[in-house]
Image (cartoon, rainbow, N blue to C red):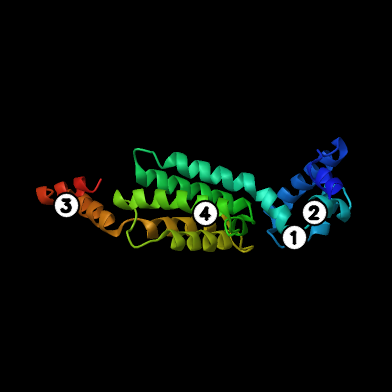
Amino acid sequence: MADQSADATRPLRADARRNREKVLHAARDAFAAAGFGVPLDEIAAQAGVGPGTVYRHFPTKEALFEAVIQARIEDLVADARARSGAADPGAAFFGFLARVGQEARVKRDLPDAIAVPGPLQDALYEAIGVLLSRAQHAGAVRGDVTTSELIVLFKAAAAAFQDASATPATRDQVFAVITDGLRSRSRGLFAQQLIAAPIIGQPVPSALLLSYISRQ
């Protein structure tokens, strides 16, 4: 038992560290390109090592995937938390949404990454929930959307972005539809009324103007 404990805590040799980094680098590219379904043997081939080397460092594909996505999820959490203190909660929310949309366009493993249960997922969902709540209280986002529903929407959007038949224009349109669907309907109606009143030759009613201002 003592020898096994020592082996578990002993630092990796230089060549073992290099092989581990090769595996992680290849796995990042493979998961981003093909999602969680990519075989471990294919990752080993891209890394230029044998399958045994991969299994020595990462006993399961789940363990390798978690090692790969940890830094990415931590970065998303940090970004969401940083945006939560912004003066404009609506801009902060939709800015984060745009960042997630951009990542989903180029990284096929994003839906799987945000679905992995554990402390990192909890931290991400909590940070997104704060962004959503602040934007809703500011009147920028419709109030009937929950954090769990937003996560489902993220996953659905990522699947749509990764459809082989989707063109860049189609992906942009899908994102625009999602964004518009999340915006507060009452806020949009107020804006339309404010714009329309001068066009049809009528002054903007003071009650309407004050009500709109109070929602900003």
Q: CA distance from mark 1 to mark 4?
A: 26 Å
Residue nearest the observer in this picture, 44 or 33:
44
Which of the two residues, 71 or 186, is positioned nearer the viewer here? Answer: 71
Q: Residue at x 34, y 41 (%)?
A: 88
Circle 3 residues within 10 Å: few <14, some 14–19, many ≥20 = few
Callout 2 crowding tier (Cα within 10 Å): few <14, some 14–19, many ≥20: many
Residue plotted at (63% across, 52% down): 107
The residue to which callout 1 is attached is: 38
Q: Secondary structure at mark 4?
A: helix
- Please, what is the three-letter code of the amino acid marked with disc 1? Val
Query: What's the CA distance linking mark 3 and mark 2?
Result: 61 Å
Given contact means CB atoms under 8 Å apart, are the residues at marks 3 and 4 in contact?
no
Circle 1 residues within 10 Å: few <14, some 14–19, many ≥20: some
Helix, strand or loop at label 3? It is: helix
The amino acid pointed to by label 3 is Ala
Residue that label 4 marks: 122
Q: How many marks?
A: 4
Sequence-first tag of 1 and 2: 1
Say whether disc 3 or disc 2 marks the residue closer to the N-terminus: 2
Position of residue 16 relative to residue 50, above or below, is above
**Residue annotated with mark 2:** 43
- Residue 215: percent from the left, percent from the top? 23, 49
Q: Is residue 135 left or right of residue 208?
A: right
Q: Which mark is residue 68?
A: none
Image x and y of residue 163, in percent: 61, 63
Q: CA distance from mark 3 to mark 4?
A: 46 Å
Separation of marks 1 and 2 at Cα, in angstroms: 8 Å
- The residue that label 3 is drawn on is 197
Residue found farthest to the top: 14
* In this view, the mark in front (3 or 1): 1
Question: Of circles 3 and 4, which is in front?
Answer: 4
